[in-house]
Each structure stands twice: as C-alpha cells, then as structure tokens.
Image (tube, grey):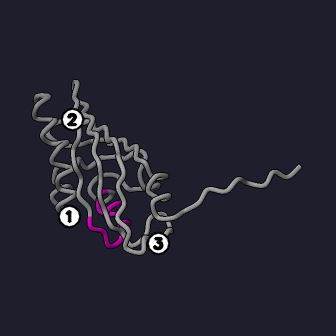
C-alpha cells in the first residue's frame, strides 16, 4: 500500500473513535495489533481494541485531527480531543468538558494497523478535572 493509503487508514481510525464505531476500528486492526502507552495488559488484536474502548465508560468525544505525517509504513497523527467522560483515572468529571492533545504513531501493513504508540496529555486532563499535585513526604 502507498503512504497515502496508510494515511487514510490512520485518519479513519481516529474518525471512527469519534463516531463510536468500535467494530469498524477492529476491521482495520491486525489480529496481532499491540498498543504502547495505553491501558496496561491489553490483549492483542481486535479484542484489545474492544477492551480499550470498553474501559472508557460513558464518553462523548470528538477528535480533531491537526496533522498527519507519514514515512514508510508509519503514520503519525497529532489530534485534539474534546470530551465529557464520567471519570478519568478515578477522578470524577462532574460533567466538565476536557480538552487534551494526543499523538498516535501507527505502524501499518497490508491495510491493517499492526502497532500503535500513544502519547497524550493525561496529566492536563486530570488537572482540568480538579486533581491536585501535592509534594510527597520525604522520610529520612
């Protein structure tokens, strides 16, 4: 497949998240798919995709794709998410909208995403929900 074809697949993956079309995401995900930087312990392939999205709980989200850059079989997507989720990492949202950025690097082969690396501003999301950072106590 061409670099342009791979960019279309990576872009579609993000668009399908906004549309809550998990089974369609599974169709463009390889049986051996792995994710780095997401939920720990995900199984490979479509079962991992389903487990990842089921872990979110109720969520309304819209991804806005900012950049798509590709070379060889890797495609980088930089995007902004606007969402309302019941809670994130145990912090209740109380209906607050959260806005955060994320970068995904997808490795694509034969029209399927075989590996994904995720880096997102999860700390920024927690702070938007009212989480506070407190210094730890140093015991001597």
- Residue underneath mark 3: 92
Q: Earlier in the sequence, mark 3 or mark 2?
A: 2
Where residue 94 sits: x, y (%)?
A: 42, 75
User: Secondary structure under badge 3?
Assistant: strand
Mark 3–mark 2 Cα distance, whole angstroms, equals 32 Å
Of 43 and 100, nearer the camera is 100
- Residue underneath mark 1: 20
Where residue 3 sits: x, y (%)?
A: 14, 28
- Residue underneath mark 2: 68
Q: Residue at x 46, y 52 (%)?
A: 124
Which quadrant: the N terminus?
Answer: top left
Picture quadrant of residue 47: bottom left
For discs 3 and 2, the disc positioned in front in the rendered view: 3
For discs 2 and 1, the disc positioned in front in the rendered view: 2
Q: Earlier in the sequence, mark 2 or mark 1?
A: 1
User: Secondary structure under badge 2?
Assistant: strand
Of 81 and 14, nearer the camera is 81
Q: Circles 1 and 3: CB distance less than 8 Å?
A: no
Where residue 42 sits: x, y (%)?
A: 40, 56
User: Could you tell whether 124 is left or right of 118 in the image?
Assistant: right
Instruction: Pick out the residue farthest to the right.
Output: 140
Q: Residue at x 19, y 55 (%)?
A: 25
Q: Is residue 53 magenta?
A: yes
Q: Earlier in the sequence, mark 1 or mark 3?
A: 1
Instruction: Pick out the residue farthest to the top.
Output: 72
- Which region is colored magenta? 49-60
Of 23 and 77, nearer the camera is 77
Q: Circles 3 and 2: CB distance less than 8 Å?
A: no
Count neighbours of disc 3 (C-alpha within 10 A) and say few if under 14, some if 14 to 19, many if 20 or more: some
Mark 1–mark 3 Cα distance, whole angstroms, equals 22 Å
């Amino acid at each position: 497949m061409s670099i342009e074809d791979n960019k279309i697949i990576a872009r579609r993956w993000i668009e399908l998240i906004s549309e809550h079309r998990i089974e369609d995401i599974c169709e463009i995900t390889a049986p051996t798919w792995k994710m780095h930087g997401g939920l720990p312990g995900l199984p490979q392939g479509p079962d991992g995709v389903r487990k990842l999205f089921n872990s979110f709980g109720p969520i309304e989200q819209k991804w806005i794709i900012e950049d798509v850059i590709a070379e060889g079989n890797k495609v980088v997507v930089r995007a902004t998410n606007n969402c309302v989720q019941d809670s994130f990492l145990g912090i209740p949202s109380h209906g607050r909208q959260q806005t955060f950025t994320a970068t995904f690097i997808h490795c694509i082969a034969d029209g399927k995403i075989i590996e994904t690396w995720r880096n997102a501003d999860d700390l920024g999301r927690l702070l938007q929900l009212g989480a506070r950072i407190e210094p730890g106590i140093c015991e001597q």
